[in-house]
Amino acid sequence: MYDYLIVGSGLFGAVFARQATDAGKKVLVIDKRPNIAGNVYTEKIEGIHVHKYGAHIFHTNMEHVWNYVNKFATFNRFTNSPVANYKGELYSLPFNMYTFNKMWGVVTPEEAAAKIEEQKKEAGITEPKNLEEQAISLVGTDIYEKLIKGYTQKQWGRPCTELPAFIIKRLPVRLTFDNNYFNALYQGIPVGGYTKMVENMLDGIEVRLNTDYLENKAELDALADKVIYTGPIDAYYDFKLGTLEYRSVRFENEILDKPNFQGNAAVNYTDAETPWTRIIEHKWFEFGKDDEGNDIPKTIISREYSSEWKPGDEPYYPVNDEKNGKLYEQYKELADKEEKVRFGGRLGEYKYYDMDAVIDSALKFAEKEL
């Protein structure tokens, strides 16, 4: 009945579905959730588009990806400028001259660079062997202790000395007053929310929700010539080689009867004692306005708690260490032998993907496949 059965309506699945349909293929998209859009799903509550699975800020340097998403949504001018809260002291993120001035009272870039160099020398680090050493060599001891250590250990559930250095290599450090976290040419949030954007991608395509592929595999496989699977690769093989590890995130949402809780979309809590990693105030992704451009009298916040993934939780971040890398390679060998199934996306490839990279990956895959 179908050329392709697409398992999962997140970005990878939706982009492939669109490309295949436009190429004249008949596709069926299924999702075990009651909604489309995977982890970029936004739900409208009190006039606010709530990012149900954590903050998603679109940013890219890939012009073809930017042009592609703009076919399905108009993007606002949102710039990601998070704030770090360390026991009530507020600092700018990314680390920039505002951060260094607040931390050390330095005024010029030269003074800031000298301070970092001095602390790096004191720590005696030449070749960083772990995340702690890498962070100190980038920003010095004070910033590491106050703004990185507690947050990172909450995020990963492991001491910074046990985490690989590469995790923090892309940390933006600037000797300017630039508060834009992402160094990306294109950036913003889709007006009307991500769900609407994915809805536009899936326009005219058959979608079945509340449909669990792995529970109904034989009958669903029989419907299509090929399957594009975007779920966890280890679950597809019933974990027969072992379970890949993830970090998960739990959200506590609150509707508050006031127009403004923290004055910013994201505030990171960087001390070890505060149990949550950050608080998201969703209305500031859209400048406090609803779809009609009116001020919104209420606000919605989400406290994020990072946790070790266990079966039944939502898998978010692959733990890309050596042990999991080897296990993934074994699953990939099995996947490469499949004749009618292709694996894609964050869970299918066990890869930490930004949104633009998922879309780029799906477009390249579609071009090759179709």
Image (spheres, helix red, strand yellow):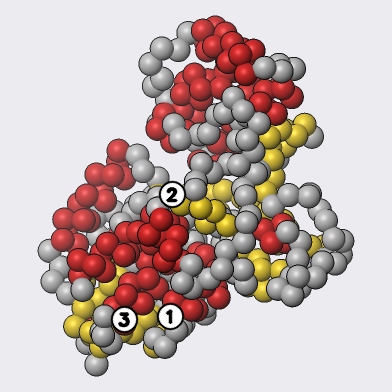
Q: Are marks 3 and 1 in contact (CB under 8 Å)?
A: no
What residue is shown with label 3?
22
- The amino acid type found where label 1 is placed reads Leu
Residue at 72%, 22% (x, y): give it: 101
How far, Cα to Cα, is label 2 from label 1? 25 Å
Residue at 16%, 56% (x, y): give it: 333
Does 305 sit left or right of 340 as displayed? right
Query: Which quadrant would the N terminus be assigned to in this image?
Result: bottom left
Nearer-the-camera pick, 253 or 125:
125
For residue 129, above or below residue 11: above
Residue at 51%, 41% (x, y): give it: 183
- Snapshot quadrant of residue 144: top right
How far, Cα to Cα, is label 3 from label 2? 25 Å
Front position among marks 2 and 1: 2
For residue 57, above or below residue 98: below
For residue 363, above or below residue 214: above
Q: Residue 61 carries which label?
A: 2
- Indicate the secondary structure of the residue bearing disc 1: loop
- Snapshot quadrant of residue 339: bottom left
Q: Residue 281 carries which label?
A: none
- Indicate the secondary structure of the residue bearing disc 3: helix
The count of marks equals: 3
- The amino acid type found where label 3 is placed reads Asp
What residue is shown with label 1?
202
Specify the farthest residue to the bottom: 1
Does 269 sit left or right of 33 as displayed? right
- Considering only order in the chain, which callout, 1 or 3, is on the residue closer to the N terminus? 3
